[in-house]
Image (cartoon, rainbow, N blue to C red):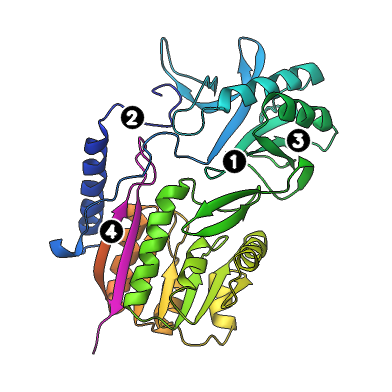
């Protein structure tokens, strides 16, 4: 793990990891947010239900190793010599899936037979960009997504046939065509190459369909603990109308529908919103509606039923200043903020405190064992004047 650059703190015992993350969260709230949160407002950090093999998604890059095409981890490798950039072979990944190596063997052998080469960002030559695997922790089924430059056939029918024959857990093959510069995965042009169009995950009593571009927490069992806790908080607050911002494919909003009369979810990705609507229908949930668009545009452009509670689950960059103003202008009596970044959470809580909201609860959840990342659930209530 030291070479691949993923699990940066796997050398620490798990109890020490939890202690370090909780301490970092407290320090961030004080130093960045200028917040003096009372100790009785902090909950003990909730550990991940699984410490290994918890992750449902892995992103790999195509590259070379010993003159062979591989799919592995991109990073700076310093083991056994000077630092050099490249793609590191991944014989296994203890936080993802025990079935990883067999899938990689099939994919890499197929690319070799097809005579395909990794894309080189400097020369703009080559075809293979990324390989993404998504695994349902509920069913064990796996979705394979191959990202290529150009839309040639590349023997995808044969690849799917071999995957089904040699790794039966693979039930879905997609291709993402990305002709843009840059090293980020682009799901803008997707082609379904074989099998099911989705995999199904179970979470907090819900059945959820996950597609290639779905934004979904990569630790489903850990995420379920957060969403169920959010549901209990909403019940305690006797929420009637809930507005969920940055909802993704909306598992949290679907859980909240059990504890409130009306839920509206907003996300900038139309694909996520279509996914959310499908999952609501799949679970027989009729009191949720979903809108596609930027939070800043949707919140100002619609006459919402006044929300009792606003639920936030923004990206790592947190809330924009304009977004913060729009949310506080709605004047909900409570905010539930789920964050994946202690630094931007601390900054945003400081802004929300200045706008009249008091921190009532800070509950950290470790959804990413062996890495430095931390998920935090925060509850704020509007101060009375």
Are discs 1 and 2 less than 8 Å apart at CB? no
- Crowdedness of circle 3 by 10 Å Cα count: few (<14), some, many (20+)? many
Secondary structure at badge 3 equals: loop
Q: Earlier in the sequence, mark 4 or mark 3?
A: 3
Q: Which label sits on residue 316?
A: none
Which residue is denoted by mark 1 in the rendering? Answer: 134
Residue situated furthest bottom in the rendering: 385
Using residue 277 as the reference point, say whether residue 376 is left or right of it. Answer: left
Q: Which label sits on residue 10?
A: 2
Are discs 4 and 3 less than 8 Å apart at CB? no
Q: Which segment is the magenta one?
A: 364-385
Question: Which residue appears at 43% of the width and 48% of the height?
Answer: 221
Q: Is residue 97 above or below residue 137?
A: above
Quadrant (top left, top right, bottom left, bottom right) of the N terminus: top left
Q: Which label sits on residue 149?
A: 3
Question: Which residue appears at 30% of the width and 60% of the height?
Answer: 346
Q: Is residue 350 above or below residue 216?
A: below
Q: Quadrant of residue 376?
A: bottom left
Residue 298 position, x and y percent, is 58, 76
- Crowdedness of circle 4 by 10 Å Cα count: few (<14), some, many (20+)? some
Q: Is residue 119 above or below residue 312?
A: above
Residue 287 position, x and y percent, is 56, 78
Q: Is residue 155 magenta?
A: no
Quadrant (top left, top right, bottom left, bottom right) of the C terminus: bottom left
Gap in Å between the C-alphas at discs 1 and 4? 28 Å
- Crowdedness of circle 2 by 10 Å Cα count: few (<14), some, many (20+)? some
């Amino acid at each position: 793990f030291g070479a691949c650059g993923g699990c940066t703190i796997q050398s620490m015992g798990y109890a020490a990891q939890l202690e370090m993350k909780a301490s970092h969260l407290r320090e961030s709230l004080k130093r960045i947010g200028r917040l003096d949160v009372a100790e009785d407002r902090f909950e003990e950090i909730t550990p991940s239900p699984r410490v290994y093999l918890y992750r449902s998604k892995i992103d790999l890059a195509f590259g070379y190793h010993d003159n062979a095409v591989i799919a592995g981890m991109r990073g700076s490798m310093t083991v056994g010599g000077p630092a050099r950039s490249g793609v590191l072979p991944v014989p296994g990944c203890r936080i993802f899936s025990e079935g990883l190596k067999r899938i990689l063997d099939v994919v890499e052998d197929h690319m070799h037979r097809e005579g395909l080469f990794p894309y080189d960002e400097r020369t703009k030559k080559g075809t293979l960009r990324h390989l993404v695997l998504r695994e349902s922790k509920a069913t064990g089924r796996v979705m394979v997504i191959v990202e290529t430059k150009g839309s040639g056939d590349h023997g995808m029918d044969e690849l799917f046939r071999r995957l089904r024959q040699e790794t039966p857990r693979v039930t879905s093959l997609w291709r993402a065509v990305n002709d843009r510069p840059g090293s980020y995965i682009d799901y803008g042009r997707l082609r379904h190459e074989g099998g099911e169009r989705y995999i199904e995950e179970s979470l907090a009593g819900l059945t959820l369909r996950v597609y290639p571009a779905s934004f979904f927490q990569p630790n489903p069992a850990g995420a379920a603990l957060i969403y169920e806790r959010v549901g209990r908080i909403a019940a305690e607050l006797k929420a009637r109308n809930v507005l969920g911002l940055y909802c993704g494919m909306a598992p949290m909003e679907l859980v909240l529908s059990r504890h409130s009369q009306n839920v509206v979810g907003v996300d900038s990705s139309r694909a996520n919103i279509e996914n959310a609507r499908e999952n609501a229908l799949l679970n027989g949930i009729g009191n949720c509606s979903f809108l596609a668009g930027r939070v800043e545009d949707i919140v100002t452009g619609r006459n919402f039923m006044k929300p009792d509670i606003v639920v936030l689950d923004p990206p790592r960059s947190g809330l924009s200043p304009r977004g913060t103003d729009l949310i506080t202008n709605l004047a909900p009596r409570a905010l539930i903020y789920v964050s994946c970044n202690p630094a931007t959470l601390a900054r945003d809580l400081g802004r929300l405190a200045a706008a009249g909201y008091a921190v009532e609860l800070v509950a950290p959840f470790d959804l990413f064992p062996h890495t430095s990342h931390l998920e935090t659930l925060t509850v704020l209530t509007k101060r009375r004047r």
